[in-house]
Image (spheres, rainbow, N blue to C red):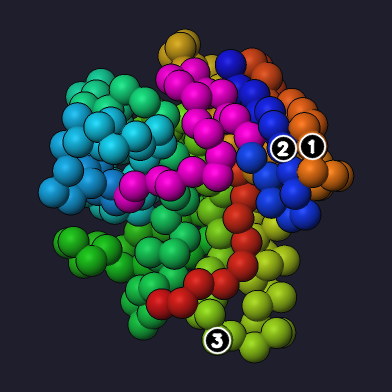
């Protein structure tokens, strides 16, 4: 079950509850980063003791080492990490675009050189979605074209528009994967409907996000500092 309830709004601020198959997340949320399947210096028990409800892992890093197939054979990312609460996987877009000098970008996707073994790899919106499904994320992020924080408007707008086009490719590639899999859980992937109801007043309102059999892909666009 995937659902999002807004409990209160005040101006642009909102407080809500995101319901996922493996647990409920109160928003806004602090999300510890477990890039390669672990949060450094903290065990899953430590994370629970400090109230973590959602952990982030990274598609790029898990794809190049140990590989999403290895994670899947070991029981999926939750078992691999020893974490039984919700997981969000970043698309790997930031990591790929940070490899300046060793990657090539076109409309199809990005070709890059692995920082682990030096091999050439090709990541597309469809492939990024497939990897996140194989890992077993509860929330998958759309593959995004990331530009530096100081990019000019033309460069930033080009990246934004490409990210939106890539989002359109992520969504249909995600839906057949959901239908063909017999797994109990699959990633919810959409931010569009989570963010579709803007703040109305300092009161309560509700927005249904994603129901069973109706998945989509979470999108984030904008720029980041290197």
Are there few (<14), some (14-19), or many (20+) residues within 10 Å of tag 2? some
Q: Earlier in the sequence, mark 3 or mark 2?
A: 2
Q: Is residue 32 magenta?
A: yes
In the image, taking residue 73 as reference, residue 16 lies left or right, namely: right
In three-dimensional space, the C-alpha distance between marks 3 and 2, rounded to whole angstroms, equals 34 Å
Kindly identify which residue carries mark 1.
Answer: 203
- Which numbered disc, 3 or 1, marks the residue closer to the eye? 1
Q: Which residue is mark 2?
A: 8
Q: Tell which tag, 3 or 2, sits nearer the viewer.
A: 2
In-image side of 19 versus 47 (left or right): right
User: Residue 137 at what x, y percent from top left?
Assistant: 42, 32
Give the SS element for disc 2: strand
Residue at image coords 60%, 43%: 218
Alpha carbons under labels 3 and 1: distance apart: 37 Å
Q: Which residues are magenta?
A: 16-33
Q: Earlier in the sequence, mark 2 or mark 1?
A: 2
Mark 2 → mark 1, Cα distance in angstroms? 5 Å
């Amino acid at each position: 079950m995937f659902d999002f309830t807004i409990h209160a709004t005040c101006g642009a601020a909102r407080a809500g509850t995101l319901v996922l198959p493996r647990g409920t997340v109160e928003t806004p949320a602090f999300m510890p980063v477990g890039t390669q399947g672990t949060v450094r210096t903290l065990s899953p028990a430590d994370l629970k003791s400090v109230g973590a409800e959602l952990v982030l892992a990274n598609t790029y890093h898990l794809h190049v080492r140990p590989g999403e197939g290895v994670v899947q054979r070991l029981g999926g990312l939750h078992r691999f990490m020893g974490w039984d609460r919700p997981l969000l996987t970043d698309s790997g877009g930031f990591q790929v675009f940070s490899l300046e000098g060793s990657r090539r970008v076109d409309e199809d996707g990005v070709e890059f050189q692995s920082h682990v073994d030096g091999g050439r790899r090709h990541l597309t919106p469809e492939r990024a979605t497939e990897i996140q499904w194989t890992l077993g994320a509860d929330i998958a992020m759309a593959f995004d074209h990331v530009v530096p924080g100081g990019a000019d408007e033309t460069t930033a707008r080009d990246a934004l528009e490409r990210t939106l086009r890539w989002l359109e490719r992520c969504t249909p590639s995600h839906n057949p994967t959901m239908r063909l899999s017999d797994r109990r859980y699959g990633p919810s992937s959409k931010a569009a409907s989570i963010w579709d109801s803007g703040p109305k007043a300092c009161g309560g309102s509700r927005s249904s996000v994603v129901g069973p059999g109706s998945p989509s892909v979470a999108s984030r666009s904008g720029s980041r500092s290197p």
